[in-house]
Amino acid sequence: MFTGIIEEKGRLQAIKQDNQSLQLVMQASKVTTDLKVGDSISVNGVCLTVTDFTATSFQVDVIPETFRGSSLAQLSRQSSVNLERAMAANGRFGGHFVSGHVDATGKITRVWQEDNAKYYQIAVPDSRYISNKGSVAVDGTSLTVFGVTDHHFTISLIPETQQATVLGEKKIGDTVNVEFDMLAKYMERLLQQPAEGLTEDKLEQYGF
């Protein structure tokens, strides 16, 4: 589980690609300080497992499902990436619940500046899980939605986010990893379940 608060921008040091899988070595400094093999790290919003590490780098594997469902296959050597370690139980919770399981890739269709804010319009196949003023994770960054249509949503970056994440470097046509708010997904799933056995007495029993 992650918060969507990016800890540092890393750099892709080495990449080995098979048909539909990857082995990546990321250069980093902050996220490697207490690293162990088997730890989870979010790389551009994708939860990956550390298989090897040094004081200044770590290695992860990307399986075919992740290869096909995220933008990681578009990375090249020296690409910048957003990095976040799994959430610690004793830390502050500053973003929103982010699982690191990408729901869709989106394409940036518009970028504009307004005072100190940088706005991005992102096209997605379906925006039913996105709500205005709700939360969304873009390349692992927890952000607030400022506009939504059937197939687009708009986010805004404060100067700090522009500097501290790879989103500040993105341009029109770039692909990003999108994770919808998991609460919205769970709610839809619950509403799809049959209401058999749901009575006024049972609702009253559970405090409704």
Image (cartoon, helix red, strand yellow):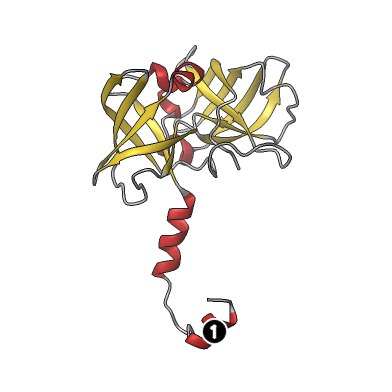
Q: Is residue 118 above or below residue 146?
A: above
Res 96 seen here: yes
Residue 71, horizontal then vertical, whole percent? 41, 30
- Answer above or below: position of 130 versus 153: below
Mark 1, residue position: 202
Please identify the quarter of the rendering in which residue 92 is found: top right
Q: Residue at x 43, y 40 (%)?
A: 136
Q: Residue at x 48, y 86 (%)?
A: 200
Foreground of the two, 29 or 77: 29
Q: Is residue 114 left or right of residue 93?
A: left
Looking at the rendered structure, the secondary structure element under dot 1 is helix
Q: Callout 1: 10 Å neighbours few (<14), some, many (20+)?
A: few
- Would residue 165 appear left or right of 106 to someone viewing this image? right
**Percent coordinates x, y for residue 111 in the rendering:** 28, 22
Task: Identify residue type, mark 1.
Answer: Lys
Task: Tell me if residue 63 comes above or below residue 160 in the rendering.
Answer: below
Q: Is residue 172 at all visible to an observer of this figure?
A: no
In the picture, which quadrant includes the N terminus? top right
Residue found 71% across the figure and 42% down from its top: 89
